[in-house]
């Protein structure tokens, strides 16, 4: 099912902001970091799987046992070829604030300014940081942070979705029984891709957007 947003002036302003941001050259002191989250259903085997044998793959019974859900926060720096993934039990605003705090104070502690690209989920706004940390601590934490929001119904402009798709195909597309196993698999994937310096090459420009979408623009 498609959800097609109206290409209003606000839509275009946000889209242009992100496309201009993505067109910038790499600046180590001013990273562009795309952030998103994903829920993962934990599934356990209802009975032991049959092990691998010569000529036969590992075989699982079609029945499984639900083990609850957990959340993955994903941050990717496309041109810096760095990603940070954290598995949490929930994705409440306290969890999101703690994840951004980790990015600002640990991962990008030496950055002069951090550009965070996010969607419009209600936990992603400055007021949530003030509610969780207090006004002054939130201001201190975010003094080096610039928020960039995708247009509504335009999460395709957030490159974190590309990274999540890769994580799905390479790591998550199978039964994972518990949070400990999931965290170990995610950490291994993250470490490997960072060591291989896997970035994301974004080629869609502001000019491309106008050429493809101008006839749908709403004044």
Image (cartoon, rainbow, N blue to C red):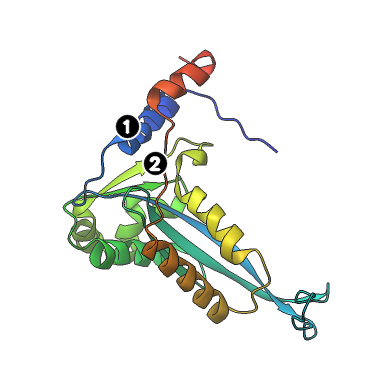
The residue under label 2 is: 149
Question: Where, quadrant-wise, is the C terminus in this rendering?
Answer: top left
Looking at the image, residue 106 sits to the left or right of residue 37; the answer is left
Question: Where is residue 58 shown, x and y percent of the image?
Answer: 75, 77
Q: Residues within 10 Å of mark 2 (few under 14, many from 20)?
A: many
The residue under label 1 is: 20
Confirm whether residue 91 shows in the render: no
Label 1 secondary element: helix
Question: Where is residue 153 shown, x and y percent of the image?
Answer: 54, 37
Please tell me whether mark 1 or mark 2 is closer to you in this view: 1
Which of the pair 169/213 is nearer the observer?
A: 169
Q: Which residue lies at the image location 75% right of the left edge and 83% below the top edge?
A: 51
Q: Which residue lies at the image location 41% right of the left edge and 31% below the top edge?
A: 15
Task: Give the numbered dot on residue 216.
Answer: none
Q: Report which quarter residue 5 is drawn in.
A: top right
Looking at the image, residue 108 sits to the left or right of residue 73; the answer is left
Label 2 secondary element: strand
Question: Where is residue 168 shown, x and y percent of the image?
Answer: 59, 59
Q: Which residue lies at the image location 45% right of the left edge and 44% below the top edge?
A: 158
Q: Contact (CB < 8 A) between labels 1 and 2?
A: no
């Amino acid at each position: 099912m498609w959800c097609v947003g109206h290409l209003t002036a606000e839509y275009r302003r946000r889209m242009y902001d992100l496309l201009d941001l993505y067109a910038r050259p790499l600046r180590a002191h001013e990273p562009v970091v795309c952030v998103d989250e994903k829920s993962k259903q934990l599934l356990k085997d209802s009975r032991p799987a049959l092990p691998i044998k010569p000529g036969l793959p590992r075989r699982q019974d079609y029945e499984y046992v639900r083990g609850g859900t957990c959340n993955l926060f994903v941050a990717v720096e496309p041109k810096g070829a760095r990603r940070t993934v954290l598995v949490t039990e929930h994705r409440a605003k306290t969890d999101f604030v703690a994840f951004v705090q980790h990015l600002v104070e640990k991962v990008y502690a030496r950055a002069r300014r951090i550009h965070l690209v996010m969607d419009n989920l209600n936990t992603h706004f400055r007021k949530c940081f003030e509610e969780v940390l207090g006004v002054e601590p939130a201001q201190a934490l975010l003094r080096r942070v610039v928020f960039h929001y995708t247009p509504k119904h335009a999460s395709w402009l957030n490159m974190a979705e590309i990274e999540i798709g890769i994580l799905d195909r390479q790591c998550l597309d199978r039964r994972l029984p518990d949070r400990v196993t999931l965290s170990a698999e995610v950490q291994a994937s993250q470490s490997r891709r960072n060591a291989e310096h896997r970035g994301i090459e974004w080629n869609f420009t502001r000019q491309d957007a106008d050429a493809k979408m101008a006839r749908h623009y709403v004044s």
